[in-house]
Amino acid sequence: QTPVWLDCDPGHDDAVAILMALHLPEIDLKGISTVHGNASQQNTTHNAARCLLAFGSQEQVRRIPVVAGADKPLIRVVRHDDEIHGEDGLGGVEGLPDKTDAAVVAKLQETKAQTAVLAIAEAARALPDGEQLALVATGSLTNAALFVSLFPDLVRDKVSQIVIMGGAEGRGNRSPTAEFNILCDPHAASIVFDAEVPVVMAPLNITHTAIFQTHDNAALLTPGSALASLAETTPEARASPAKAHTPLRHTLSTLLNFFAATYASVFSFHDGPPVHDPLCIAYLSHPHLFRGERYRVDVELEGKYTAGTTVVDLWEYRKDELVDYKEDPESRKSWGRLGKNVFVLEQLD
Ligand code: BDR
Ligand code: CA
């Protein structure tokens, strides 16, 4: 099992990432932190707790902390994405506890005095010798940037990799060339790409190949279908397909249908929405399904038209500025000198 910390801004696809992180046997979810992005940090925090309560086992609900992180970017002005995710970040979703639900309030009360960056550090430090934490970031990178800046030694020793959903090779979704998570806090992204730790990036190019299609929704609601069984979280429910509209499958369907509707109206995606964020979890549980390449990736911080763009050096124009990683693929030390050398996921098998 890979120990994982999930830093997110739920968000419809973040919610699916939480579900997967809770139930894939390859993943040992240690904690969830939240960041501004799809909605305000207050809302994304409520949403993370609502998802944990709805999707997790009782043991997971007790053990896994939900910790609030940054409520604004390092330098830029905060922005949210009501148009895609609704005002509270999880528009249209049915079956989750409300944010005023006593269990949600109690869960968040536990971590009221904590802050995301310190909680991530604590989780990394608490791992036994020889184990390392994978940090997954599926929102803007403000918490991740603060974490790598404050704890460089801990990051070097106890963090195996940072896997992010964000950026793109030559396209955007919230500007002609910028992807939303990077656009929300480009300075933070630049800091993370330059950290002395392997960084893996799932850009739009690959997430736009992972589409939740209309027939997937039908399958999700069909008792006994492979997808319906996958979406059951208990062995009992998996074994009894007769229980058609279980609460979880209904919740997932409402969640993905809302996302489908906003993607259809905003981006004219009529086949279904890309489920971006879960790819980070899938990469950790099933890395063999992914193909990618290492590239230097810079972030455009100031461009008049291109701020927030990930500049992926596909043709190695700036290779001379890097130590050649191929000569020393295993050395953790070389990553520091290699700053901005990112493993970009390009294809899903
Ligand atoms: C990213 O932005 C948000 O809309 C999603 O949650 C995802 O993390 C896609 O650009
Ligand atoms: Ca997200």
Image (tube, rainbow, N blue to C red):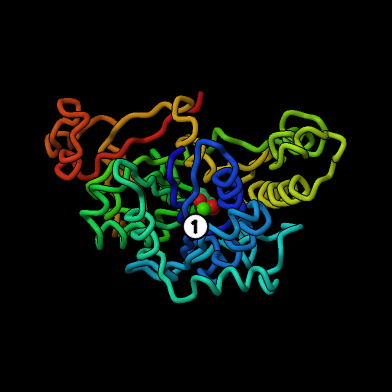
Foreground of the two, 23 or 13 = 23
Q: In the rendered structure, which amino acid carries the disc numbered 1?
A: Ile
Where is residue 320, by image quadrant? top left
Residue 341 in sight here:
yes
* 230 left or right of 89 in image: right
> Residue at 60% across / 58% down in the picture?
61
Please name the residue shown 54% across and 42% down the image: 278
Q: Name the residue under label 1.
A: 32
Q: In this view, does 279 lie to the left or right of 329?
A: right
Q: How crowded is mark 1: few (under 14 residues within 10 Å), some or many (20 or more)?
A: many
Q: Is residue 280 above or below residue 10?
A: above
Instruction: Examine the image and state in which quarter residue 336 appears.
Output: top left
Point 36% across, 50% down: residue: 127
Q: Which residue is drawn at 75% across and 33% down?
A: 215
Q: Is residue 232 rendered to the left or right of residue 39? A: right
Nearer-the-camera pick, 133 or 163: 133
Q: Position of residue 134 (x, y in %)?
A: 38, 45
